[in-house]
Amino acid sequence: MRQQGLPIKHSVWVNNLLEMRYLSTRGGTEPVGFCEAVAQGLAPDGGLYLPEKFPDLSGKVEEWSELSYPNLCHAFFQHFATDLPEDDLYEAIRMAYCGFSHPETAPLVQLNEHWQVLELFHGPTLAFKDFALQLLGNLYELQIKRSGRDLCILGATSGDTGAAAISGLLGKKGVKVFILYPDGKVSPLQERQMTCTGADNVFPLAIEGTFDDAQRTVKELFGDLSFRDSIGLSAVNSINLARILAQSVYYLYAWLRLSPDVRESTTFVVPTGNFGNVFAGWLLTRMGIKMGGFRVATNQNDVLHRLFGSGEYQLGEVSPSLAPSMDIQVASNFERLLFYFLDGNADRVREVMKTFRDTGRYEFEKFSIPGFSSSSTTDNEIPQIITKIWNEHNYLADPHTACAFKDLSNHDPAVILATAHPAKFPQVFEDAGLTRPTSPILEDLLHQSPIKYPLQVNSSAVRSFIEQKLNPLSSGS
Ligand SMILES: *Cc1c(COP(=O)(O)O)cnc(C)c1O
């Protein structure tokens, strides 16, 4: 077993580090502290929060190379969560990762001389989103203690986010969670992950309609500022800064486990949808960590692949794929990268986002950022890749992870991020004539009874449902 790392210091406040503040990509908000940025999710001017400056970690990381996963996460977050007492932060992190089933939390598996897989699916819902959402739940709890105000979490999901958010928030004091999903359109396993928790603070709302209908309803409710304020509404989608920072940690953990002679030449290959995950990795390069590069691997919904190829950012129709958690039209975290691409010019960010919102497209003369490459994978190719990886490496890659192998050079060092456990998508393997992967966590769900709340997809129905659950006495039920 790896040593549990450095002992925890007992000073209560982090006082040897400068206070970190957070700015909006659109420049219309006063800087806020970490806890406030996390509680708000989206900045009031519609932008996304980013740190005002970055710590230089280049001189520190060697000292961190032997730390366990939670201790590395703690060392990293001390530079960002400077308004949280150190011991509270440590406890939030320790609790977040103690439910992961692998002792390394994020193990690296060697496939051949050059390729390693970073397995990010050992959390309670078997997808990488657990890394961020298990921690976010604990940070919300701390924020409620600080502010004395309860929080109400509202989100729409097509599968993985809802399951991970519910798992991260179930049973949290002062938090109620409402997750809308399209009835009959998420996989049966994903639905069970949301509806079989037994927690009384979680309300999975099975709506009549599509994911886009669910998403629109959620946006409408967030747009109602007085409602939003009166119930302390917060968002858990990947625009939340805490989610991004929590994900930076596993890139650093993996980088520290590479042999030093390949650290600067190893590419991280990232199955990508909303651009949150790959952006989290790239942020480390702003902190003095020398990484080989990032490969943005999309499925057939290839808006980002086209952007890196041609400079054109163009809204398309979502086409449902075998890697459903990457089925997106607009990559919400792209705005964060844009902010740096435009040298921190918030006026230009606002302009680009406005043009994009009004016309559905934006054309950059050239969109190239050193270190980025991209690929796209069709639904025909996914089963072929899965079969090839199985035959050549005896490794089962889930359909999202499979996209990362598209056109990947066999001769260059790469870390491939495995974003979901193959057992979450058993049908693809069966159809490809391979053994159906299983997981005891998912088998267990089959014996629980689901609880869900069927609802019409309109904002007033959802609003009254929420109000009734928040104030069961005043509405008389
Ligand atoms: C959410 C998700 C992705 C996409 O991640 P982004 O941060 O949105 O780019 C990829 N794979 C799986 C399994 C996911 O759940």
Image (spheres, rainbow, N blue to C red):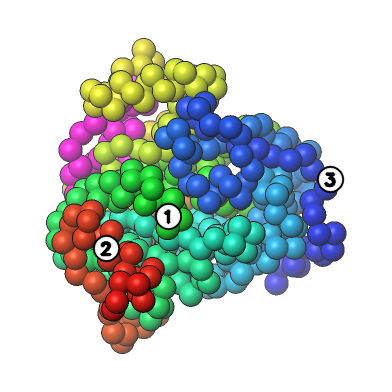
Which element type, helix, strand or loop, lies under badge 2?
helix
Please name whichever residue, 350 or 197, is drawn nearer the observer in this view of the structure.
350
Question: Any mark on residue 230, and which?
Answer: 1
How many neighbours does mark 3 have within 10 angstroms: few (below 14), some (14-19), or many (20 or more)?
few
Residue tagged 2: 464
Q: Gap in Å between the C-alphas at discs 2 and 3? A: 48 Å
Label 2 CA crowd tier, 10 Å (few <14, some 14–19, many 20+): few
Q: Is residue 325 left or right of residue 114?
A: left
Quick one: 32 or 167, which is closer to the camera? 32
User: Which mark is drawn over residue 16?
Assistant: 3
Could you tell whether 220 is left or right of 6 in the image? left
343 lies above or below 328: above
Q: Is residue 320 magenta?
A: yes
Q: Which amino acid does label 2 sit on?
A: Ser
Which residue: 26% across, 63% down? 464
**Looking at this view, is 386 or 208 the one in front?**
208
Residue 191 sits above or below residue 301 on the image: below
- Image quadrant where one finds the N terminus: bottom right
Residue type marked 1: Ser
Q: What stretch is highlighted in magenta?
A: 298-321
- Quadrant where the image shows the C terminus: bottom left
* Residue 393 % position (x, y): 41, 58
Give me the C-alpha separation between circle 1 and circle 3. 37 Å
